[in-house]
Amino acid sequence: MSRLTKFFAAIIAWVVPMTANAEDTYFTATGQEDGKALIFRSLKAVPAGVHEADLPNRVIILWRYESDLNGMPDADANSAQIALEDALMPLDVNEIGRQVLVVTGNNRKEWHWYVKDFDSWIAQLNQRLATSATYPINISHTYEPLWSSYKDFLAEVNGL
């Protein structure tokens, strides 16, 4: 079983569906990993108008933090993470890339994206963050034109 599958297999509950705009429906779910709570925020489905192969590069932004709150970020880390996410949101459009999943807990926060062109996307990210605080993030990417990791996550949530 892959790390990703183990990670997503811990999901235990749907919480409240949310809608950010007419096209995208999000949901939250909770789970556990290593005895610590996880919170997932995800798109419920591939966004309308998106063809997975047009955004074939899976990107994970990882922020590790220390916590005495059962693995959840403290108020300062949470505020900084929200600021980072706000800076990223202009890149969340069908022509550039889509954020499909955010995972918080067990001393880390992860933002999962699928993007059209990684080099262009990272250049835009760097431009967006040029005037911001320095964030303790690591960014990795892989070629995944079928969005299999995201679809595996949805299947785990739906019990398939």
Image (cartoon, helix red, strand yellow):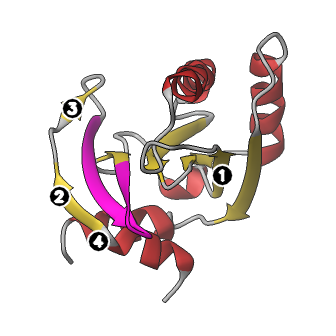
| Circle 3 Cα neighbour tier, 10 Å, few/some/many (<14 / 14–19 / ≥20) | some
- The magenta span reads 25-39
Q: Are the two marked residues, 1 and 3, in contact with CB atoms closer than 8 angstroms?
A: no
The percent coordinates of residue 71 (x first, y second) are 48, 50
Mark 3 lies on a secondary structure that is strand
Residue type highlighted by circle 3: Met
| Circle 2 Cα neighbour tier, 10 Å, few/some/many (<14 / 14–19 / ≥20) | few
Q: Which mark is residue 106?
A: none
Sequence-first tag of 2 and 1: 2
Residue 120 forms part of the magenta stretch: no
Mark 2 lies on a secondary structure that is strand
Query: Is 124 displayed left or right of 26 in the figure?
Result: right
| Residue at the extreme top of the image, as rendered | 131
| Circle 4 Cα neighbour tier, 10 Å, few/some/many (<14 / 14–19 / ≥20) | some
Task: From the image, tell me which residue sits under label 2.
Answer: 13
Task: From the image, tell me which residue sits under label 4.
Answer: 156
The percent coordinates of residue 90 (x first, y second) are 58, 20
Sequence-first tag of 2 and 4: 2
The chief SS type of the magenta part is: strand
